[in-house]
Amino acid sequence: MIRKFLDLGLQPLANKFLARKDLLKKKIEYYYHLEIGFNTKTKLVSILNTVPSEKMFDKKYPYRASMSQTMLISFKSLSNYIDKTFKPNLIMEIGSNDGSFIKNFKKNKAICVEPCGNAAKITKKMGYKTFSNFWNLKLAKKIKKKFKKIDLIYSANTLSHIKDLNSVFRSIIFTMSNEGVLIIEDPSLLECFKKVSYDQFYNEHIYIFSLLSMKNLLKKYNLEVFNIDKLGTHGGSIRYYIKKTSNKKFKINKKVNIQLKKEINFGLNQFSKYIKFRENVKRSREKLMDIFSKLKNKNKTIIGYGATAKVNTVLNYCKIKDETLDYFLDTTPGKINKYMPGSHLFVQKYRKALTNEADYIFLGAWNFKEEIFKKERKYIKKGGKFIVHVPFPRII
Ligand code: JHZ
């Protein structure tokens, strides 16, 4: 049974930034009702009203993983580990985006799957065999026919974006060799609850996995988690190392049981914890709006930093618009000079000098706080302040 525990209201699509002409033409934005539920049997958390994939992942998809040094470093160190530990002959990445991960592998040893046409073009240009399709059994069959044996499948922040998990895992077991390894990384539900990072919920994040739910899910396909890494990326993620149950080459690392116990002790298997999260989210909204209103009463200038997909959940749930924030700074070419979905806040191309214009900066990319604080140490040194809403709204 799926029990609803959170309602974040009507929301626009988190990565549909608008052009000026869209605003002038009063283009009607696509809205969906962002409600989140907990499956009491499988422990899987999912959004309840999904948006067709074709509407979200098209040739205008703006997100680029390479915009953050943190992600590039994380991908590089995983690639070294993969080479050393698993020594794959052929690796496939599902959701390869702009090649930030795959560029660490030789072109004849790696293939990419990426449905967003604009991103797929990048890895094709880099020389990687790229299938610009959604991941499903039809594509899996095509790939298997051509490549026969895939030893390692990697997918970061992608499988949680695909509604039909049955198709996802059937296609994976079809393509992956019996000794093969599947590595998935996605935001961790435990971290999301601990940090009250309710902005992990938006149309693209159909699921927020926990190890608990992942374990239940994999059982059906005779797959099992044999190790995990806890990552700081994307606000706290888990990297799951998965194998076919029949493969006895890898022992189950004790980190797996430790994490399971942590999730159970925290209460991720009990609905009451989900109700508590709902209360925390409401409090987080009140506190954030209180901070903004006090600063605006004192005529302070506030801008946003990092026009993330996530922050759109916050802006639209808290109804924050241009009375509060002047604009957002961002480095992503596909977002610059556009307007944010719903709030219509302008995205200004990042220039260091612009931070001087603000008394306060609201950190949309709070998950890259360390990286951004390092970059903006001059602003901080001369007394500039940041506003963050995670793990609780505050000025730092
Ligand atoms: P970032 C996207 O989410 C969408 P978002 C997707 N659904 C997902 O799951 C995750 O990524 C993986 C900017 N920035 O990575 C760049 C600066 O301007 O948190 C990005 O627009 N300056 C696939 O969008 C944004 O912030 C900087 O110095 O929530 C970061 O977006 C840095 C570090 C970032 O993901």
Image (cartoon, grey):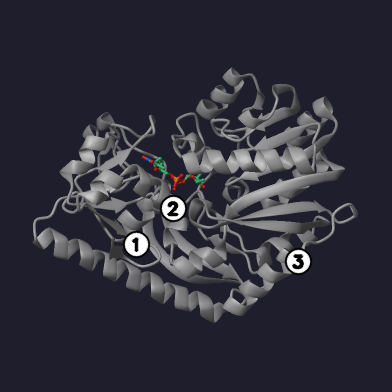
| Residue depicted at 9% across the width and 56% down the height | 299
Q: Which residue is disc 1 drawn over?
A: 389
Depth check: give the residue in front, 377 or 299. 377
From the viewer's perspective, tell me whether residue 37 is left or right of residue 12. Answer: right
Amino acid carrying mark 3 in the image: Lys
The image position of residue 362, as x and y in percent, is 28, 53
Depth check: give the residue in front, 232 or 213. 232
Q: Earlier in the sequence, mark 3 or mark 1?
A: 3
Amino acid carrying mark 1 in the image: His
Disc 3 to disc 2, C-alpha distance: 28 Å
Q: Which residue is disc 2 drawn over?
A: 367
Disc 3 to disc 1, C-alpha distance: 34 Å
**Comparing labels 3 and 1, the label whose residue is closer to the camera:** 3
Indicate the quadrant where residue 80 lies: top right
- Circle 2 SS class: helix
Amino acid carrying mark 2 in the image: Asn
Q: Earlier in the sequence, mark 3 or mark 2?
A: 3
Check the image and report above or below for 166 versus 139: below
From the viewer's perspective, tell me whether residue 340 is left or right of residue 115. Answer: left
> From where the camera sits, is residue 40 visible?
no
> From where the camera sits, is residue 349 visible?
yes
Whether the residue carrying mark 2 lies under 8 Å from ligand 1 is answered with yes
- The quadrant of the picture showing ligand 1 is top left
Disc 2 to disc 1, C-alpha distance: 11 Å
The image position of residue 217, as x and y in percent, is 72, 60
Is the Cβ of the residue at disc 3 closer than 8 Å to that at disc 2? no
Q: Which residue is disc 3 drawn over?
A: 254
